[in-house]
Image (spheres, rainbow, N blue to C red):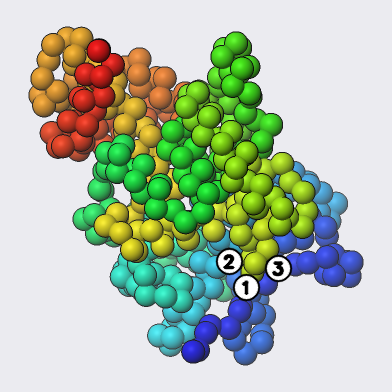
Amino acid sequence: MLTQPRCVFFIDAIAVALGVPAELAGTPFIVDEDGRLHNHINEYLLARRNGDWMGFGVIAGAEAEISGRKVLLASILFLRNRAYQLNAFRRWCKANNLNLNEVDRKKVVTYAKHLQAKGGGSGPRPIAPQSVTQHVTSILDYLDFCAARRWRRGPRIKRRSIVLHPRGSEEAWYTESKILSFIGELGTSGASMGATIMYRMGLRISETLNLQISDFPSIERYRSDPNARRLVVTGKNGKIRRVFFSESLLRDIHDYILYDRPHYEARLSVPTKALLLGRTRGARTGPLTARRLQKEFQVVCARTSFSHITPHRLRHHFAAHYLLRAALKKQNLLNLDIRTFDVSIAGANLSLDIIILMDMLGHSQIETTMKYLKALGALIGSFVINEYQDSLDDERH
């Protein structure tokens, strides 16, 4: 069976010992199939790491001093993902006899459709539309970098000029029982626990994977201390917020720590206090990675009827289901028919709930949170209503 040669490598301790700045350790670089360095992409990745190129916006990182100046370091995880995305695009260009630095808007759109149809990896599985957007963003940022250094000619390709038409199933919304069923299909306890936390707390994948065992209190302290019922989370750009979690979720986390986590902990080569553990590269065990978790989601989607559920879409479902519960309770109090739902009216009736949700999600603009009202409109009028109505009936009795 033929496999693609490995082309993405990383600056290691040997390179640092030979004089490469320690701040660049872990930075990816690409070697062509014929063994030559791909200088343009590598210079781009280094520029991203040492703050010489910001592209569409600042990439959150840490300040460091390189060559006598302070710079903002792009995170290694961000660079690693970007390197794999650009390498997939490089291979596609090579397979289609295209010069990487001379592609135009039509070629980028063609590649995006290729990703939607066949995926960006070695297999034929398509990838989610939001992932296609990430790939396109990476390509356009790289092409802008090349144009700024006069390696590429031609007009700038504006991101808004690339309109993709995702598959209709991309906007699928599921009931709570369906989401919990999906989580139950995940193959490992770490992935299942991580997905449960993202769905029941609305956390981003990076926020979830950064959780430590010590972040969660005992059941006794949770009951006696109201301050222990919220988790301090560091989100995008270092923004700190406090997120509520339920006692039932805390019990699930304690059960995972007591019964499931020890199986992975026994195989750790380096001790860690990270909450979620799983397989890393090869057969090694360590803190669960975003790439491993995303792959488990893809496997479940491929073998079930679920369409394009990703870790981030669990956060979307947390928000949509939160507003749906709030809307149903409000409609019950006002004795109104939920099926007369109107987005503008709901925005007024749920104003306080939207503000609370905005705080829980860590949004800086309320307009971002308001977008979930459209998802709420998609949920109402379907069988989703019946499920939540039953739960409200149970609460009243």
Query: Is residue 181 among what the camera can see?
Result: yes
* Residue denoted by label 3: 10
Q: Which residue matches tag 1? A: 8
Quick check: marks 3 and 1 in contact, CB under 8 Å?
A: yes
CB atoms of marks 1 and 2 within 8 Å: yes
Task: Quarter of the image for the C terminus: give it.
Answer: top left
Picture quadrant of residue 166: bottom left
Name which quarter of the figure residue 216 lies in.
top right
Asked if labels 3 and 2 touch by Cβ distance under 8 angstroms, the answer is no
User: On the rendered structure, is 335 left or right of 251?
Assistant: left
Which residue is pictured at 10% across the width and 20% down the height?
337
Q: Residue furthest toward the front?
A: 259
Q: Which mark is residue 374?
A: none
Q: Position of residue 8 (x, y in %)?
A: 62, 73
Disc on the earlier residue, 1 or 2: 1
- Residue located at (78% from left, 67% from top): 12
143 horizontally vs 323: left or right? right
Residue sitting nearer the eye, 264 or 34: 264
Q: Nearer the viewer, residue 327 or 32?
A: 327
How would you rate the neighbour count of disc 2 (Cα within 10 Å): few for under 14, some for 14-19, many for 20 or more?
A: many
